Image (cartoon, helix red, strand yellow):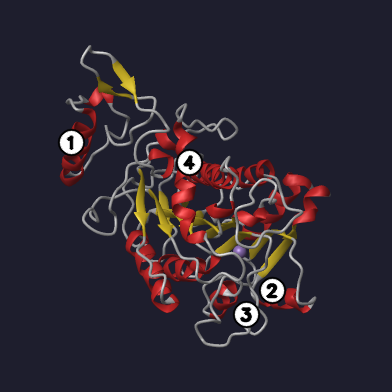
Amino acid sequence: MLHLNPAFCALLTLATSALAGHDHDHDEQMPLDFARFPFQPIYRGSNGEVTADAVFSGITTFAKLPWVQCLTREKDIPFDIAFIGAPFDTGTSYRPGARFGPSGIRAGSRRLTLYGGYNVPLEINPFQSGLRLVDCGDIPVTPYDNKVAIQQIEEGHKALLQREAFSPLGNDSATGEALVPLSVDGKHHPRIITLGGDHTIVLPILRSIHSVYSAVSVIHFDSHLDTWKPSVFGGAPSDQAAINHGTYFYWANQEGLIRNGTSIASHGAIRTTLSGPEDYDNDNESGFHRIEAREIDTIGTDGIIKKIRDTVGDTPVYLSIDIDSIDPAFAPATGTPETGGWSTRELRTILRGLSGLHIVSADIVEVAPAYDTNAELTTMAAADVLFEVLSIMAKTPLGKVQGN
Ligand SMILES: [Mn+2]
């Protein structure tokens, strides 16, 4: 039995009794006394029959996790990993619509816990790993003023990230030694998984990450560079226009938010056309190593995993996944699709290969559900990709043995 603070218990009692219509005893609940799962019988009919909730019913949160109003009235409830939406799409250059990404990804995630959520290749059920997982809803973001919106995203992300995690960090699984946090302030912080939103949101997120971890390595899966100079991408007719979904990494580098030098970031899935070869020079200056999408045909997923792991090492890593790294055959609903990409299976394999890396937080961006098929291919792909991210986070405590 894990310790729960009194406010949390009160909330739980309220939530479970309201939902179930009868009192639960602790044995009927999940290990955290918190997460409810679709296969759990929760409703007792008049004839005594107990029926499990169905994945297609109810209010949709990510993977049907509990909704906690983390930014407002329930801000004192601690957690280990939070999902939060950033419904911002006014930094896009081609097709808008990623403001509907958070709700679309949640809809695509409904089946994640249908059979309980055990990840077979990674041998873990992230929903039953002992970590407290929550869906914090969305950061309120204005669609009328990008400068304000970017500030709102930074503040909303910081408000979650700067807290202390619910669960203790624990000990190293190999040596048994106590782990110490990777943060600058020495506290054990929770991890945030952001549902975008267009890719611009990563600039305010990296500002938030910097406030806790200093400069981090970035693993960036995308068909585009996103390090373009504002004069090249968008032409920068104003200071605000210069910050968009093709330039945010340029600015992140200018602001010192990304590690450069020995610990460097890695694009995956690159395959866009360029303004010219000099775009790669500019990308190098921003501190990125590149993996081209077509390299999967020569070095395979194992080779790509090795390149990424060799590049970031054991540095703190921020993971940013543009859904357009997947081929539009599998994920058509995105703002700037590029053919010749990876399959959903390939990206998921590569992500599982990152298990053990110190991923401090992550996002998936550029999901624009209006362009999806009726079969919800893209939102399902986004949700399943995040299932892999969640699983590798659950497998890897965010700490190091002192002195290493
Ligand atoms: Mn992008």
Mark count: 4
Compute the Cα span from label 1 to label 4: 26 Å
Q: Answer with the quadrant where ligand 1 appears in the image.
A: bottom right
Q: Is residue 169 visible?
A: yes
**Figure check: 52 above or below 300:** above
Give the residue at mark 2.
Answer: 283
Q: Nearer the viewer, residue 103 or 398?
A: 103
Pointer 3 local density, CA inside 10 Å: few below 14, some 14–19, many at least 20: some
**Figure check: 106 above or below 337:** above
Q: Amino acid at mark 3?
A: Gly
Secondary structure under tag 1 reads: helix
Give the residue at mark 3.
Answer: 234
Q: Mark on residue 13? A: 1
Tell me which numbered mark, 1 or 3, is placed earlier along the sequence: 1
Secondary structure under tag 3 reads: loop
Q: Position of residue 48 (x, y in %)?
A: 23, 13
Residue at point 60% right, 48% down?
A: 354
Compute the Cα span from label 1 to label 3: 52 Å
Tell me which numbered mark, 2 or 1, is placed earlier along the sequence: 1
Q: Position of residue 102 (x, y in %)?
A: 45, 53
Tell me which numbered mark, 2 or 4, is placed earlier along the sequence: 4
Secondary structure under tag 4 reads: loop
Q: Amino acid at mark 1?
A: Thr
Going by the image, does 67 lie left or right of 96? Answer: left
Q: Can you tell which of label 1 and label 4 is closer to the viewer?
A: 4
Q: Quadrant of residue 120?
A: top right
